[in-house]
Amino acid sequence: MAGLTGPRLYSCCNCRNHVSLHDDIISKAFQGKHGRAFLFSHAMNIVVGRKEDRQLMTGLHSVADIHCNDCKQVLGWKYLRSYEPSQRYKEGKFIFEKSKIVKEDW
C-alpha cells in the first residue's frame, strides 16, 4: 500500500512554521530584497505589517511586509495596491523571498 502524501508546503526557514502551499505559486520569476523570490496567491500563518509605498523594479506599489506568525521573521511582502495598471494583477498577492522559506517534507 502506497503512503499517503499531503500538499507540498513551504515553511519559514527560521522556525519551520508552514507559510504557503506549492500549488499557490503564481511565478518564480520575481526579485526580492535579498535575491530570487516567488509570487504566491495565498499565504498562511503570517502577520501583515504596516502599509507603505515602495518603489520596486516594476514601479510604485503600496505593500506591507509579511512576518512569520511564530518567530516574526520578515519573509517578504504583500502587494496591496499597484499604481501601474499593468501591474494590478499583483494586488492581494504575496512575495516570499526564496532565502526565507524552505520546502517542507518533499
Image (cartoon, rainbow, N blue to C red):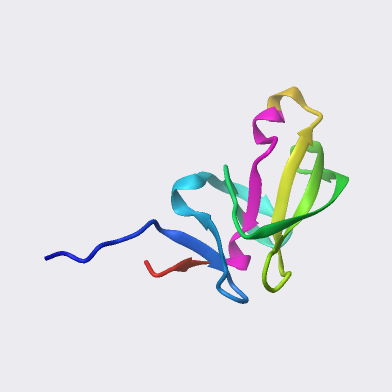
Report whether 17 appears left or right of 58. Answer: left
Rendered location of residue 82, percent (x, y): 77, 32
Rendered location of residue 47, percent (x, y): 72, 58
**Picture quadrant of residue 88:** top right
Q: Residue furthest top?
A: 85
Magenta-span inclusion, residue 90: yes
Magenta-span inclusion, residue 34: no
Residue drawn at x 61%, y 57% as measured from the top left: 36
Is 80 in front, or is 84? 80
**Picture quadrant of residue 65:** bottom right
Task: In the rendered view, tell whether residue 60 sits above or below residue 36.
Answer: above
Rendered location of residue 57, percent (x, y): 75, 43
Is 34 in front, or is 1? 1
In the image, which residues are magenta?
87-101
Residue drawn at x 39%, y 70% as measured from the top left: 105
Rendered location of residue 101, percent (x, y): 57, 65
Is 5 in front, or is 84? 5
Residue drawn at x 11%, y 65% as measured from the top left: 1
Q: Residue furthest left?
A: 1
Residue drawn at x 29%, y 61% as measured from the top left: 5
**Picture quadrant of residue 75:** bottom right
Report whether 62 appears left or right of 93. Answer: right
